[in-house]
Amino acid sequence: MRKLAVVVSIVLFLLSLHATAYAQVHRDSVDQAIIDLVDDIDIAEEVVYFVRLHNGDLLSGPVREIANDAEGTFIRLGTEIGRAKVYLHQIAWIGTQERSYRQHHRLYIMPTAEPIGKDHFLGLWELLFLYGGVGIGDVVSITAGRTAVPGIPFDQQVSAVTAKATVYAGDNGIVEGGKQYYAVGMAAGWLNDANFLANIFAVATFTGKRSSVTTMMFAKVAGPDVYTFHAGRIIDPFNLTYASGKIGVGLGLDSRIEDRHDIHVVGELWNADITRPSNTALYLGLRLANTAFSMDFGMTVLTAPAVVPTVAFAWTPF
């Protein structure tokens, strides 16, 4: 089983390597894409663009003008404080308001049905679980992670790998401009190297102007029914029961606060075994996000009862 954990570590390393190696190539392609985008920009009051500069500044508003001067090609944005003149060589990222939120493929724990797409990210969950993800086209999304808890042996850490395929995307016919997405996937985990489990899942996401709603159903398909979990000398070993064939459900919400581009309310309600209501957890928190970084912080309420502070950070370069 140690080999399996090594495989997870290798996958996570490759995701990190991919993100690093891809960054410069993507940077070059972004620079060219920004130049190419000039031909596709809509100069219309109702189309809002987000612009992130190389120094980190953020601007938003409709594009009012595209022109050239001695310093190069520039655009003028109709921002809240007036027109802003921005040269293309100053821009690190530009896109419409819908594309500016690059965390759409996940809630806090739950995946959504939306793909990672052309993005990739690195994250840190609960300050102890390092994970990353990449998209392949607009269909396949792969994430992997592993804990790094001080004081716990390597073979007693926790690992996870998830592969998701977005099989349909289209208008939802409910909200103007709203979309619907459907995805299927598999999640494999190791609660210590010796405790393997696997779930299959199906997920649907419906988006509106500021919010998205996600529903999910999953089932355990592999692994023993009872796990003995070890964590070095931090806690005594204890048993966890999670039988194969158990079906779980989840419900998630991601809603951007009105008149704020950077703050979202994120909530999840999920149950790992629909025959046991006591296996239910509720997460509610806030997400602060720009076009590159996101920070999640909130509380998870368990029926034990227990309340667990929850935090996460993610970086989606360029």
Image (cartoon, rainbow, N blue to C red):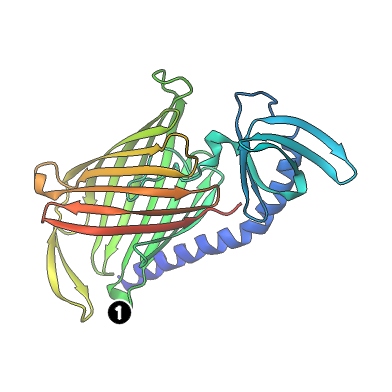
**Quadrant position of residue 201:** top left
Q: Is residue 132 above or below residue 113?
A: below
The residue positioned 27% from the left and 74% from the top of the image is: 156
Q: In this view, does 21 lie above or below 73?
A: below
The residue positioned 9% from the left and 42% from the top of the image is: 275
Q: Which of 90 and 183 is in front in this view?
A: 90
Disc 1 on helix, strand or loop?
loop
- Determine which residue is flagged by label 1: 153
**Quadrant position of residue 114:** top left
- Decide if residue 39 is in sight here: no
Type of amino acid at the residue the image marks with label 1 = Pro
- Decide if residue 51 is in sight here: yes
Q: Where is residue 179 in the image (x, y as percent from the top left)?
A: 44, 27
Give the number of callouts: 1
Q: Which of 270 and 16 is in front in this view?
A: 270
Q: In this view, does 317 lie to the left or right of 305?
A: right
The residue positioned 50% from the left and 40% from the top of the image is: 261
Q: Position of residue 118 (x, y in %)?
A: 56, 44
User: Seen from this angle, which residue lies furthest right?
Assistant: 70
**Quadrant position of residue 227:** bottom left
User: Considering the image in quadrants, where does the N terminus appear?
Assistant: bottom left
Q: In this view, does 48 lie to the left or right of 205?
A: right
Q: Badge 1: how crowded within 10 Å, few (<14), some, or many (20+)? A: some
